[in-house]
Amino acid sequence: MSIAWTSFTPWTALAGGLLIGLASALFLLGNGRIAGISGIVASPIRALFTRSDWRPELTRLAFLLGLLLAPWLWRLAAPLPSAQVDVGTWGLVFAGLAVGVGVRLSNGCTSGHGVCGLSRLSLRSLVNVLCFMGAGFVTVLVLRHVG
């Protein structure tokens, strides 16, 4: 995947970051729960098999629906950014499985630890984010410069 750095606009990046922070804070204040995607996704799936009352899960389902609808709403205002993936199907499958294992091992994903955990000054989240970033740096180094 390549990034068009000449198209980077700091004001839209700042606005996006502020919206993510605001949404995370509102989710925490309104529900008392962290807006970590892995926990939000896993909870309704577990509830499908264990609960008969789905009312507590409706907020999470609305959150997921918002995540799925956001790109479609964006397309009304502007074209989606183009993305080019330089790895084959098996590379994507391996990457997805590796991320899934990492999420389970760290008890959360980058949104839960990086956005919500760091803002709460969680030491566990800081360690997890350093591990996420370090693994990403090493992966890029190996794939682009060593291999």
Image (cartoon, grey):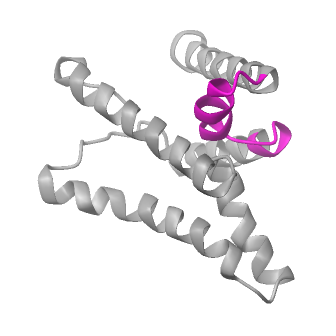
User: Which residue is nearer to you in this view: 143 or 38?
Assistant: 38
Residue 14: percent from left, percent from top: 32, 25
Q: Is residue 91 above or below residue 74?
A: above
Say which quadrant the C terminus sits in: top right
Q: Is residue 103 above or below residue 67?
A: above
Q: Is residue 57 left or right of residue 75?
A: right
Kindly identify the residue that appears in the image at 31 percent across and 56 percent down: 71
Say which quadrant the N terminus sits in: top left
Kindly identify the residue that appears in the image at 56 percent across and 51 percent down: 27
Q: Was residue 34 drawn as part of the magenta stretch in this picture?
A: no
Kindly identify the residue that appears in the image at 23 percent across and 54 percent down: 74
Q: Is residue 14 left or right of residue 30?
A: left
User: Which residue is nearer to you in this view: 20 or 147?
Assistant: 20
* Residue 27 seen anywhere in this rendered image of the structure: yes
The magenta stretch is 103-122
Q: Considering the whole magenta stretch, tell me its main secondary structure.
A: helix
Q: Is residue 66 left or right of residue 128?
A: left
Q: Was residue 120 drawn as part of the magenta stretch in this picture?
A: yes
Looking at the rendering, which quadrant does residue 132 occupy?
Answer: top right
Q: Is residue 51 above or below residue 86?
A: below
Q: Is residue 80 above or below residue 18?
A: below
Residue 112: percent from left, percent from top: 66, 40
* Residue 93 seen anywhere in this rendered image of the structure: no
User: Which residue is nearer to you in this view: 17 or 136?
Assistant: 17
Kindly identify the residue that appears in the image at 70 percent across and 74 percent down: 56
Residue 145: percent from left, percent from top: 53, 10
Outermost residue, front side: 29
Give the total of numbered labels: 0
Residue 22: percent from left, percent from top: 45, 40
